Image: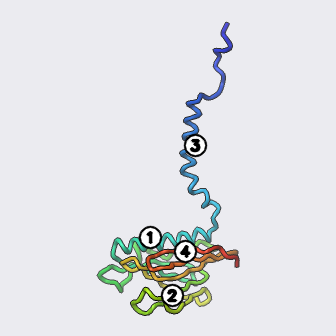
Amino acid sequence: MIDSRLEKKPGFSLLELGVIMFIMMIILGFSLPRFPRLFESDLQLETRKLARLIDELRQQAIFSGETQKLVFDTKKSEYTVFTAKADQPEQFAPHKQFDKPVPLKAPVQFYTVSQIETPEGDRQFAGRKIVFDKIFGQQFQVYIDSSGFVDLFTVRLKDQKNQLSLSVVNIMGKMVIGKEIPL
């Protein structure tokens, strides 16, 4: 006769549970930082993507010594990136990574682009504000020179319900993303 106390009961040992918990914590650690992005709108995602692009272009300009130019087409709701070599600062060619225009993800589109116009060669003091909007369908250019200085501008993006702004607030490339405003 077998002692009932020695019978093995179904279940998991403490070691097995510990291993499972460890694996679950690793999976949770990788997925948790991405979790809030699941609830972001296309408008927020496109605005953050544009901010990352500007920051990346600024870093490339500093490290490579090349001038970067970002051209916003308000009519087509797309942007194009160009690069000028240090020895030929006036001759822009398509950027290696972004050789084609990058469209905004529908239904997001450019609402307005505005720039603080400065006197020629003076990037420190702001002049008058120029606005390019979708109605006129103009192209707007932002320069990032080889020292990393960025033109001051604000771009407003919109979808069917909201608008969101991205502003470069100083020449060192500091950016501020505004709140979503219902249309």
Q: State the residue position of label 3.
A: 24
Q: Is residue 160 visible?
A: no
| SS at badge 1 | helix
Label 4 vs 2, first from the N-terminus? 2
Q: Amino acid at mark 1?
A: Glu
Q: What separation in Å lies between label 3 and label 1 (alpha carbons)? A: 34 Å
Q: Nearer the viewer, mark 4 or mark 1?
A: 4
For the residues labelled 3 and 4, say whether their Cβ atoms are less than 8 Å apart: no
The image quadrant of residue 58 is: bottom left
Q: Is residue 150 above or below residue 14?
A: below
**Label 3 crowd bin: few (<14), some (14–19), many (20+), radius 10 Å:** few
Q: Secondary structure at mark 2?
A: strand
Which SS class for mark 3?
helix
Q: Position of residue 143 (x, y in %)?
A: 43, 82
Q: Residue furthest top?
A: 1
Above or below residue 103? Residue 113 is below
- Tell me, yes or no, whether the two marked residues, 4 and 2, touch with CB atoms within 8 Å: no
Percent coordinates x, y for residue 81 in the rendering: 45, 77
- Amino acid tagged 3: Met
The residue labelled by disc 2 is 116
- Which quadrant does the C terminus fall into? bottom right
Please identify the residue farthest to the left as the structure is shown: 87
Amino acid under disc 4:
Val
On residue 176, the disc is: 4
When asked about the image quadrant of residue 12, the answer is: top right
Alpha carbon distance from label 4 to label 1: 16 Å
Residue 93's x, y, as percent? 38, 80
**In the rendered structure, which disc, 1 or 2, sits on the residue that comes first in sequence?**
1
The answer, for residue 127, to whether it is visible in the render is yes
Q: Quadrant of the N terminus?
A: top right
| Mark whose residue sits in front, 3 or 2 | 2
